[in-house]
Amino acid sequence: MSFDTLGLSPELLRAVAEQGYAQPTPIQKQAIPVALEGRDLLAGAQTGTGKTAGFTLPILQRLSEAPPARGESRAIRALILTPTRELAAQVHESVAAYGKHLSLRSTVVFGGVGMTPQVDRLRKGVDILVATPGRLLDHARQKTVALDRVEIFVLDEADRMLDMGFIHDVRKIMSLLPRQRQNLLFSATFSDEIRSLSGQVLHNPVEVEVARRNATADTVDQRIYPIEKERKRALLSWLVGDGQWKQVLVFARTKHGADRLGRQLEQDGIRAAVLHGDKSQGARTKALEGFKSGKVAVLVATDIAARGLDIDQLPHVVNYELPNVPEDYVHRIGRTGRAGASGQAVSLVSEDEAKQLNAIERLLKRELPRATAPGFEPGFTLSSRPGNPAGRRPREHHDGVRRSPQAEGARRNPGNTNRGSARAGGHRG
């Protein structure tokens, strides 16, 4: 099946082709026809399944087919609610990219930045608004946004909305919307809470779901490096320098952690850039261009900021910290080993991340191979038995050799074992 069988307009098909897509993903095949019919939809789809296009394309199609009457002021006709500013920015980028050949206007509002520029854009009139709950309610209280003519309401990543405590804000926002509207709810899981929420939001919905991703490409060499948390940075620098890695995507859990790691890698003499939601669009573009061109060897990114990041034949992915959601591991390392190409996925796992590792191995239904680097032998063993915490036992290498007394001393005094910095060509820091 190709996109031109889904009933999309020539303008949208052109935009899709310009983004480099030829075949719709499973969630797009199921969701787009339902949404185009105007039906309410409950969709089960994880990050990385193409779900954003699954709702942005039909929204753009439906609004462009029924423009406002001549002389009628431009009003918000579609509202897309997301849990985080990073995701809001990403969704709005998709709306703009797919709608570039249409006469529709869109904007995004989220917290952490000034309201005045947002108010100015809203006053000019927009057809599609992407927003986070808190900032949208700020605008509603100041009467700088009107939602009484919304025709399509999208609740994206509804499960994360609930996890982050936004349910009351969502209900307040829904009270500002017309009773008669189309509703699209996307969630990675169909928990009892999501079922309850869907009963409040959706009317006679069509339910679609794509299989949860729990497989990784055979072309990806996956390795687990058990290592103390305080020695992760040194090990990463050593791996990059010793292996002469030229293009490495490193995942960090937080924005502050990503910034700190980027600075430390630069201190180690490794060219690094950082990508997260607090970065301006200009900084994001500069980081991506530097990474793709080879001027930057390491790109440190958070999960959400890396969404939509597409780099051909990316050779190395590093989990500096394991994700809390096992499926995110699959999505992260899926950025290497694509289209039959070989790739390497390395995870630096500290003792307190044993629970996340066990969850990932349960999802994959196999134990991931452990590895050690010279001088970075850990002082603990990561159990592969689900739910069993890491034991503080003498570590054995994959070749059966126990850690030497020198390595034990290095573990107890990690500051004396910063071989990563020296090997990578930088100074110790």
Image (spheres, grey):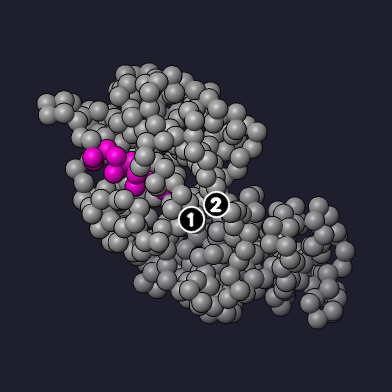
Residue 91 seen in this snapshot = no
Q: Is residue 408 magenta?
A: no
The quarter of the picture where the N terminus appears is bottom left
Q: Which residue does the image show at 58% across and 54% down from the upper left?
A: 211
210 is higher (above) or lower (below) than 137: below
Towards the viewer: 411 or 22: 22
Question: Main SS of the magenta segment?
Answer: helix
Q: CA distance from mark 2 to mark 1?
A: 7 Å
**Quarter of the rendering containing residue 363:** bottom right
Q: Position of residue 400 (x, y in %)?
A: 84, 79
Q: For the residue marked with disc 1, what is the amino acid?
A: Pro
Q: Are marks 2 and 1 in contact (CB under 8 Å)?
A: yes
Q: Residue furthest right?
A: 393
At x 50% / y 60%, what residue is drawn? 300
Amino acid type at image mark 2:
Val
Q: Residue at x 79, y 62 (%)?
A: 384
Q: Counting residues from the N terminus, which is met first, the one under dot 2 or under dot 1? A: 1
Query: Does residue 41 appear to the left or right of 381 in the view shown?
Result: left
Q: Which residue is mark 1?
A: 26
Pick the quarter of the image with the C terminus. bottom right
Residue occupied by mark 2: 210
> Residue pushed farthest left?
71
**Which quarter of the picture shows residue 428?**
bottom right
Task: Determine whether, in the image, residue 417 is placed left or right of residue 315.
Answer: right
Residue 47 pos. (x, y %): 51, 51
**How many residues crowd mark 2 within 10 Å: few (<14), some (14–19), many (20+)?**
some
The spot of residue 20 in percent (x, y) is: 34, 64
**Above-or-below relation of 3 to 172:** below
Q: Position of residue 180 (x, y in %)?
A: 38, 23
The boundaries of the magenta stretch are 54-65
Residue 59: within the magenta?
yes
Nearest the camera: 418 or 343?
343
